[in-house]
Each structure stands twice: as structure tokens, then as C-alpha cells.
Image (tube, grey):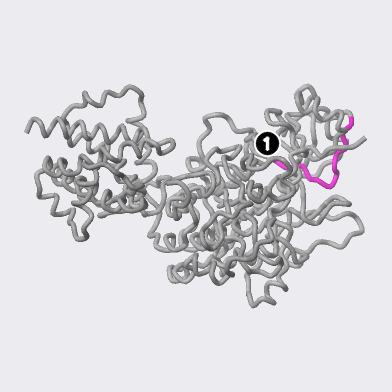
């Protein structure tokens, strides 16, 4: 009878007759605990894999749990009283469904999960390459990153894939730093030669390493060869999620373990693989499911590694409907599965060097987090020479990981520069493509090394306390609008039924509440063709006038829109189309006269702003509140 690979979650401290007996080890970076098959609770049809060490995993995710940015810590995270133990085995197909659906019927067993097949995400089309690695470096502004001391120095760059071949990379003229003691390979069958990190077959992982080094040549590669086959008869380019659990546990121990002076200060983890064959997964809604289940052990351990301080990137996948990978079967553009859509990772779509989405790049939404992918990155170029092109979201992901590693060399991970803050920086400084703002094809846009090279730091709140915001793209006139300030300001306008018309004529009190919203949307507005810059200048002028009127510090900021028709809007806009207009000068003008000029523009923007997903309605409510206060004030003066 055919057997199916499964992951079995056991109680961490059961009585001997009810669960696994394991012994800890003081050996550094050990991934698990020794065990015997006899120590595992008996389940009909189950065969334990004795080569797989029991792994401690974090407790399940509870609804309303704090986000990664709120619980960031550099301390050890595996000493958790709620942690459990994971083992691997094979069960008869006829027994899997019934036992996985009600595992707690067996003493000592917490849950049974799918050990899904995972495979890399190479390109699937035969179209010619678009450009080469040199053009990718130019598009990423690698020279500017280098000038800003962003080269990857002090950063461990983990390539989680089929393995790296250092001699091949050196034959291309590269001189990568490499740490073999912090690399990981799966066990081999008895009698087989051992796997040597950095000296593995030239394949997909070597391509990924080459692509990551484009932007981070001074990073230190570590080889995490999860996709080397452990099972006879399978290809060398696939693995099991259980191996990924072991590898991530290993990375966590590196990140939280002792370090010598001058050792690495940050870790970036690049994952160019995902689940293609859904028949290896349990159905959606089943407690053992991986694709949609945040409590699957691998999804939990990914979140824990991010909590420990790792910047993690995953490929969005190659199941775009224009040119899906053959392994996608009938599930074309069905979303981004499992950890590839985790809230605490950057999910990476693919674009060519013309910044057009490649047809095989999987569209969102994500199965774990709706707004995925997060960004797009460059792929389908002549690069490593491992394949005809470095393609797929497989190439896009390490290219982006290299940029992240480059940024980390200047801004090491820490309480004031958490993984969440870096993800926000990468997203907010991306080059918007597709529909305005976020979309399911490009995410927030194409990663921009050019903008990231200009970062001066991450945002801080009052008193210097760290805030989970972006870098300083919204810093204008010495002021800063962070994500938290923006969302906090929006929150007061999210309540339904707000009576805007009845707003009190307290212009300055209302402006104080609305100002972070204006600062947050203005950079977005500037991207809109034709009318964006003059519309932004109009809002900046109004803000400058209100700053002067209310005695607050002046700012400038901007927004952009699609082309608008309409006499009042166009006529009002024309006054702000000429260069040289001074917002500062507007501060000396009567606020009501300034508002009279800007009001038609605000009214013209409202219908467009209302269409922005998630934030559109509260943004409109905020602007209407400010307009109502100004209307009331300007009638009474």
C-alpha cells in the first residue's frame, strides 16, 4: 500500500508511555534531538523516519497575536514552554486522512500535518533573455549602493535551495565569501558519499547564489541545501517541507547563538522554491493542511525565524496564467501558497529589465496573507550561465535578497531596524507598476536599489523609540510620517456614520489629526501621470498655509492621479502647473484665500481616492473633515 510523508507534532514533555523521549545536546547549531522509533506513540500504518531528528517548534499561532514587528527579539526564542516536538514519518494512504483529522485521539499526539513536496521555481518559457547581469546591476543602482556602504558586509546570505558550487562561481570571476560551518545539508543514505556545502552540483542553487551576489558582493554566503533529494527515484531538484523545518531550526540557532567579535550582524534568507503538487498537501480546511494554514509547523517556524531577526524572502511562484510551469497543473493563478505568502516574509514576483511582469509570475492573493506578492524583482536575464537564462521568480528572489543584504550592511538588524521595518522600507520605496498602489501582479512595485541607497535610517517615534515604519521617504521639511502615524490617523476616520458636515470649525484641531494622512498620501499622488505633480503642489500649498495659520512647522509633500476632466478641477489645477511656485510664500496668504483655490482640486481627488483599496474610505473621510472645518471657518471670518 502506498505511503504518504507526514509530520507528527508531539507533546514536548509527555510521560514516557505517552510521547517521545528526547535528550538535548550542547553541540552548537544542532537542529534536533536524538530519539528512537519506539519512543513515538503507536499509530496504525505509521513508519517513523529514524534519520529525522525531533525538532522543537514554536506554539501555534493564536488569533490576534502580535505582529512580528511588535515581538522582535534577539534573544533565544526556542525556550518556549508552549513549544512542541516534530518528527517525520510515513503513513498508509488509507490511514492518513482519518488520523490527521482527529490526532488528539492518540495520547501524546498534538497534530498530523502534510509533509508537502517542494520544488524550485525555474523559468518555464523559451523567450530570449532580456539583458544581462550587468544591466541588472545598473537597474538596481549597485554603484550607488556601494557608495552608500551597502555591499553586504557583515551579512549572512542564506541560499535555501539545491546547493552552491563555489568553484563554478569562481570560474566566473566572482570571489564570494563563504561559511561552511554555518551551512546545512541533508543526511545521505548509508554508503553514499557525504554532501559538502559549497561543493554541490552546479544547478539551481548556484544560479541563485550568483544572482544574490549582484547587489551584495561582500555578503557571506551560507549553503542551505534543502532541495537535495533524500528519496530514491526522485529528481535532485526537490525536497520535503520536513527538511525545510530542520534547516530553519538550524538557521535560528545560528542567529540566536553566541558570536565572536566582528562576526556577522544580520541574516538574509533567500527561498526560490515552493509547493507545486497540491496532491502532497491536505485539503484546505483540513487541520493538517500547509497551503492555507498558519499553524502548519513550517509556517510557524518561519515566523519564529523572522522574530529572531532574519530577513526572509520567498518566490511568489511560476503559475501565472500566460505561461504557467507544467507542474502547476490546473491550478493557474490560484494564489501564493504557504510560507511563500507568510506575513513576515517578502514575497517576490518577477519582472524583466523593462519592468514588465513576466507571464509566469504567480499573481496574488496570498493564502496566508492576502496582500501578496509584496514586491517585484528582475528576472529572465543572461547571468550565471547555469541555464540559458536566469529566470523564474527563482532568479527574482535572490536578486531582491541581495539588495536587502546590501541595505543590512549599513543598517544591521536590531530593535530600531527590525525585519518588519526593513520590509516596509523595501515596499514603500519600490517603483509603482500596474495599478496605482498595491496590486496582485507587482505587489507595491519593483524593488528600487536606487531609492534604498538614499536611506538615512529607519523611523523613530517620540523620544527615539523605534516605530515599525519605513525609512525616510516621507521625510519632508524635517518632519516624518511613519506607517504607524499614518494608520493611527486613519483609524479615527474609519468609524462608519461619521457626520462630516457637522464637524466643528476647529481648523487647527482637525488639521492636526488629518496632517499625517496628507503627508502619507502625498508621495503616492506624485506618481500619477499629468496631473499628479500640480495636484500635489496644491495640497502642499494648503498644508504650508495651515502650518503658518496654526503655528506648526511647515512641511512639503505630494500625491499623483490619473488624468481628470472637469472645469473647476482643471482650472484650479492650472494655477499649480508652473514650476517655481513657493509653498512657503503661500504661508503668508490668508488661509481662506488659499483654501478657495485648492478646494476644487480636493473635490476632484475625492472620487479617485475612494477607490484605493483598504485605506481609500478613511482617507476621503479625513479630507472631508478638514474641508468641513475650513468651510465653517471661512464662512465665519
Q: Residues within 10 Å of mark 1 (few under 14, many from 20)?
A: many
| Residue placed most toward the observer, 212 or 23 | 212
Vertical position of residue 476 compared to residue 150: above or below:
above
Tell me which segment is drawn in magenta.
Answer: 45-56
On-image quarter of the N terminus: top right
Quick check: is 425 in the magenta stretch?
A: no
Position in image of residue 597 (x %, y %): 16, 44
Give the quadrant of residue 173.
Answer: bottom right
Q: Provide the secondary structure element on which disc 1 rests.
A: loop
Instruction: Give the residue drawn at x 14%, y 30%.
Output: 632
Instruction: Give the residue drawn at x 55%, y 43%.
Output: 372
Quick check: is 51 in the magenta stretch?
A: yes
Res. 463 in view: no
Q: Which residue is mark 1?
A: 296
Position in image of residue 157 (x %, y %): 60, 60
Position in image of residue 509 (x %, y %): 20, 34
Q: Residue furthest left?
A: 637
Res. 229 in view: yes
Total numbered labels: 1
Drawn side of residue 180 relative to residue 424, left or right: right
On-image quarter of the C terminus: top left
Give the quadrant of residue 56.
Answer: top right
| Residue placed most toward the observer, 66 or 615 | 615
Position in image of residue 155 (x %, y %): 56, 62
Drawn side of residue 292 relative to residue 65, left or right: right
Amino acid at each position: 500500500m502506498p505511503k504518504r510523508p507526514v509530520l507528527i507534532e508531539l507533546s514536548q514533555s509527555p510521560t514516557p508511555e505517552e510521547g517521545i523521549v528526547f535528550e538535548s545536546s550542547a553541540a552548537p547549531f544542532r537542529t534536533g534531538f536524538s530519539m528512537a522509533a519506539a519512543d513515538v506513540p503507536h499509530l496504525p500504518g505509521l513508519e517513523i523516519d529514524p534519520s529525522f531528528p525531533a525538532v522543537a517548534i514554536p506554539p501555534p499561532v493564536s488569533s490576534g497575536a502580535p505582529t512580528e514587528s511588535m515581538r522582535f527579539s534577539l534573544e533565544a526564542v526556542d525556550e518556549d514552554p508552549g513549544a512542541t516536538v516534530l518528527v517525520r514519518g510515513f503513513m498508509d494512504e488509507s490511514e492518513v486522512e482519518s488520523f490527521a483529522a482527529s490526532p488528539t485521539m492518540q495520547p501524546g499526539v498534538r497534530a498530523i500535518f502534510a509533509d508537502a513536496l517542494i520544488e524550485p521555481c525555474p523559468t518555464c518559457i523559451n523567450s530570449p533573455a532580456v539583458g544581462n547581469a550587468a544591466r541588472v546591476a545598473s537597474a538596481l543602482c549597485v554603484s550607488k549602493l556601494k557608495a552608500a556602504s551597502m555591499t553586504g558586509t557583515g551579512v549572512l546570505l542564506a541560499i535555501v535551495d539545491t546547493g552552491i558550487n563555489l568553484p563554478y562561481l569562481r570560474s566566473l570571476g566572482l570571489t564570494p565569501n563563504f561559511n561552511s560551518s554555518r551551512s546545512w545539508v541533508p543526511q545521505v543514505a548509508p554508503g553514499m558519499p557525504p554532501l559538502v556545502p559549497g561543493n554541490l552540483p552546479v544547478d539551481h542553487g548556484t544560479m541563485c547564489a550568483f544572482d544574490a551576489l549582484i547587489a551584495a558582493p561582500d555578503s557571506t554566503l551560507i549553503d542551505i541545501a534543502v532541495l537535495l533529494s533524500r528519496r530514491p527515484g526522485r529528481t535532485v531538484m526537490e525536497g520535503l517541507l520536513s527538511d525545510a523545518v530542520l534547516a530553519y531550526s538550524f538557521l535560528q540557532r545560528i542567529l540566536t547563538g553566541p558570536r565572536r567579535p566582528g562576526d556577522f550582524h544580520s541574516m538574509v534568507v533567500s527561498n526560490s522554491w515552493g509547493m507545486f503538487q497540491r496532491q502532497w498537501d491536505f485539503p484546505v480546511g483540513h487541520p493538517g493542511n500547509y497551503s492555507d494554514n498558519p499553524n502548519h509547523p513550517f509556517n510557524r517556524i518561519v515566523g519564529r525565524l523572522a522574530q529572531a531577526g532574519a530577513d526572509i524572502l520567498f518566490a511568489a511562484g511560476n503559475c501565472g496564467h500566460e505561461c504557467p510551469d507544467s507542474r502547476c497543473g490546473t491550478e493557474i493563478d490560484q494564489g501564493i501558497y504557504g510560507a511563500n505568502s507568510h506575513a513576515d516574509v517578502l514575497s517576490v514576483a518577477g519582472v524583466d529589465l523593462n519592468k514588465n511582469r513576466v507571464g509566469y509570475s504567480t499573481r496574488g492573493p496570498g493564502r496566508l496573507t492576502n496582500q501578496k506578492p509584496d514586491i517585484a524583482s528582475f528576472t529572465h536575464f543572461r547571468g550565471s550561465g547555469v541555464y540559458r537564462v536566469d529566470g523564474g521568480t527563482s532568479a527574482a528572489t535572490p536578486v531582491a535578497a541581495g539588495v536587502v543584504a546590501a541595505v543590512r550592511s549599513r543598517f544591521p538588524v536590531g530593535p530600531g531596524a527590525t525585519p518588519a521595518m526593513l520590509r516596509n522600507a523595501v515596499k514603500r520605496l519600490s517603483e509603482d507598476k500596474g495599478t496605482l498602489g498595491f496590486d496582485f501582479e507587482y505587489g507595491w512595485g519593483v524593488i528600487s536599489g536606487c531609492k534604498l541607497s538614499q536611506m538615512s535610517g529607519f523611523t523613530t517615534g517620540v523620544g527615539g523609540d523605534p516605530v515599525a515604519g519605513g525609512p525616510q521617504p516621507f521625510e519632508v521639511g524635517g518632519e516624518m510620517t511613519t506607517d504607524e502615524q499614518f494608520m493611527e490617523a486613519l483609524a479615527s476616520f474609519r468609524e462608519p456614520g461619521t457626520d462630516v458636515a457637522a464637524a466643528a470649525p476647529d481648523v487647527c484641531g482637525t488639521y492636526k489629526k488629518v496632517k499625517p494622512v496628507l503627508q502619507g498620501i502625498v508621495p503616492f499622488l506624485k506618481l500619477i501621470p499629468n496631473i499628479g505633480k500640480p495636484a500635489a503642489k496644491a495640497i502642499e500649498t494648503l498644508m504650508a498655509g495651515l502650518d503658518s495659520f496654526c503655528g506648526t512647522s511647515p512641511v512639503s509633500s505630494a500625491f499623483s492621479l490619473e488624468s481628470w476632466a472637469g472645469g473647476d478641477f482643471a482650472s484650479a489645477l492650472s494655477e499649480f502647473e508652473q514650476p517655481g511656485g513657493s509653498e512657503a510664500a503661500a504661508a503668508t496668504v490668508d488661509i481662506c484665500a488659499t483654501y478657495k483655490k485648492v478646494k476644487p482640486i480636493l473635490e476632484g481627488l475625492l472620487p479617485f481616492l475612494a477607490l484605493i483599496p483598504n485605506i481609500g474610505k478613511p482617507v476621503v473621510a479625513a479630507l472631508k473633515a478638514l474641508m468641513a472645518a475650513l468651510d465653517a471657518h471661512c464662512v465665519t471670518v
